[in-house]
Each structure stands twice: as C-alpha cells, then as structure tokens.
Amino acid sequence: MPRGKIRALAAAVAAVTALAACSGHRDSAASSRAKPPPTVQASRSHCGAGWSGAQAGIVRLDVRNTDVNAAEVYIADAEGKLYGEIDPLGPGATATLTADLAAGDYHLRCSVNDGDPVNGPTVRVTGAGGGGTGVRPVTSADLVPAVIAYQKWVRGRLTMLQSQTDVLARRLGSGDRAGAQAAWRTADHTWHTMGGAYGAFGATGEAIDGDAHGLPKGVIDPAWTGLLRIEYGLWHGESTTSLSALGNRLRTDLGRLAGELASTQFQPVDVVKRAHEISEDTLQETLTGNHDYGAHVQLDEALAELDGTTQVLASLRPLLAPRYAGLAQVDALITKSAKDIRAQRGWQAPAQGAAPSAGHALVDSDIAQLAELLAPVPTRLEPRVA
C-alpha cells in the first residue's frame, strides 16, 4: 500500500466516507463546516492534547506533529479498534484526520518513529448517529503464519513450473512445434497462478515473463527472454530449434527464482496487497491483450490469476474474515467471474474506438468489481504498531 495515506479506516473505499459525510450526518457535517476542527497534538509526550470531545458523526481533527520524528496517528476506541489514521505525519506537519464515530469513548494513538504507541486521554463522543466499523489492528507477527503458508504454496507452484519448463525445453529441442505449444500453455498457466503482478518477483520475474515493450529493437531485441519471447517465436513461425536456447535460459531463470525464494521471505505488507494487485493486473494487462504475442490465451491466464487470488485469500482468511464483511461478496464474485470466463468462446481486444463484445464487457465488469471489492484488503490487514 502506498505510504502517505490519510483515510477513514471504516470506509471500504474513499467514496463510502464521502457518502457518510453527505448522507445521514448532515447536521454533523454542517457543524464541522461551521466550526473549524480542533488542533490536536501528536507526540510521545502530548499525544491527543487539544481534543476534548465531539458529536457523533463525521469527526475531523487537525493533527499537528509536535515531535522531532515522523508519526503514525490513529483514532482508537477502548477495545483498540481503529477508526481513522494519518500515516505518516512528518515532524511539524499538520493534516486532517477524519473518522465516522458513534457515541462512546475514544482516544488518539501516536506511534513516533515506529516506536511503541502512546495513547492520549480518553475523549467522550456524544449524541446520536455515526458509527463506522472499527478495524482491529494487525501486526507483522500476526501475519507471519499467512505469509509462510502463501510462500510455501508459491514455492510448490514454482517446482511444478520447473518440471513443465523441462518438458517445454525438450520439445523445443526436438522440433515438436505442436508439443512445444501445448507445453508452453501449461507452463504459462502455472506462472499466472503465482501472483507475479506489479513486478512481485523483481528482475528475475522480468526475465521469466517480461514483454518487449520498451526494448530498443522490440520483439527482435536479443535481450528479450522468457515465456513471452518463446510465445512470440512459437506463434510467428520461428523454428523450434532456434528457440531451444530460450527454453534453456528460461530453465536457468526459474532456477534462480527458486534460489531467491528459498533464501528470502515475502514481506507481510506485500502479501496483503497481492490479491488486489493480481485483479488489477488481470484487468489492465491480461484482458486487454497487452501481453498477447500470438497464443491468445488471455482467458486461460485470467482463470489462472483468479486461482492465484483465491490462494492469497485462503492464506489471509483467518485474519481477514473478522475484519472485512465484504469477503463473502468477494468469494461469490470469484465464482461468477470464473463461470463467465469459461462461457466465452473466444477473446479479442476490441479495435481502437470500437465497443467491446457483450462477453468482453461482462468479464471486464466482473474483474473490475472484484478489484474494487479487494481494494479494502490492504487497509484492513496492513501491519501496524499495535
């Protein structure tokens, strides 16, 4: 998740907070406009100083960091649930913290320079209305079992992919084009289950599945390697024996990735972003045909990416289920998306300026909705200082 965020944690997306401010809390919103928000301190010694009370509804605080280091600032209730945050707030900086609060007791929580949090004095919120759903914070330690489980699954898929690539390389070397194309499809499907969206596997991932965009000589650039380069050759008449070296290079790069995954651990903050990133990548790259070099396997890749999303969610589910009421909708939409993808008999990106087919529009809509539903997941599970 990008840093520098100022948001209401109770909102699934920013629009929800905006709607809450305009619907059902008109009096509070009008009052907030009429009366400037109080200026509240954030520091190790004066966390919450300046906040003495509020009316239920949309509450706004102008928070000023009076410490010499950057701070993370939260509104929390007596149970420790969070309702709004500013992260980070630089020394001497001021920003508005917004939260939708029901009547009850709250306090500011300040974590300076990622240190132990300090709670400010208890503040009573009174009146009717308001009431966003607080988020119980998750720590990096809480996420460790999920990260380990997901990384173990990815390593298992990589082992499978290495075996499939061995078959691909042998068929390339033997001159079996049809067999090599079938082996390529199998390997490509497995790769797309592994959650490699947004450069998740770094430079090695780029060598395995990078496209020709930006290369000086485009599709004939000698620096282009990996699955997409082999796809281009297999479906554009290049001899299989000329592609054999690329098959062997792919095996080498997959071995390098296996070594990297064996010696490093995924970062929790990256894993909680992965499901949303995969769905965005499906919408922006896979379904648009941006990476189609002749095999026309966008539908199969989209199904593989749904499998990858499902696996990320399976690892995160114990933490996510009690924190995100939209999870059942996510599950249902994944099932619907897979069904709608399988119902398509072909896939072609619409010509420039032309409307997409009904099937194309349906699948695009499914994945766009899925990306929107998954957008709150990083917020709910981002590791915070408890």
Image (cartoon, rainbow, N blue to C red):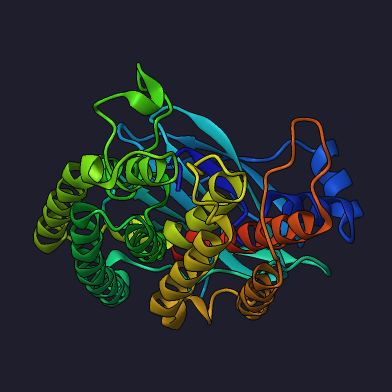
Depth check, front residue: 262 or 325: 262
Q: Residue at image x 78%, y 49%?
A: 18
**Left or right position of 185 against 69:** right
Q: Image height check: is 188 above or below 221? A: below
Q: Image height check: is 190 above or below 329? A: above
Q: Residue at image x 38%, y 58%?
A: 181
The image quadrant of residue 196 is bottom left
Q: Position of residue 142 (x, y in %)?
A: 31, 74
Judged from this view, the residue extending furthest toward the top is 216
Is residue 11 in view? no
**Left or right position of 259 against 90:** left
Depth check, front residue: 218 or 329: 218
Is residue 10 in view? yes
Q: Position of residue 143 (x, y in %)?
A: 32, 71
Q: Position of residue 287 (x, y in %)?
A: 61, 50
Q: Position of residue 35 (x, y in %)?
A: 80, 38
Q: How many marks?
A: 0
Q: Residue at image x 44%, y 57%?
A: 273
In the rendered view of the protein, which quadrant contains the C terminus?
Answer: bottom left
The image quadrant of residue 105 is bottom right
Depth check, front residue: 41 or 183: 183
Q: Image height check: is 308 above or below 63? A: below
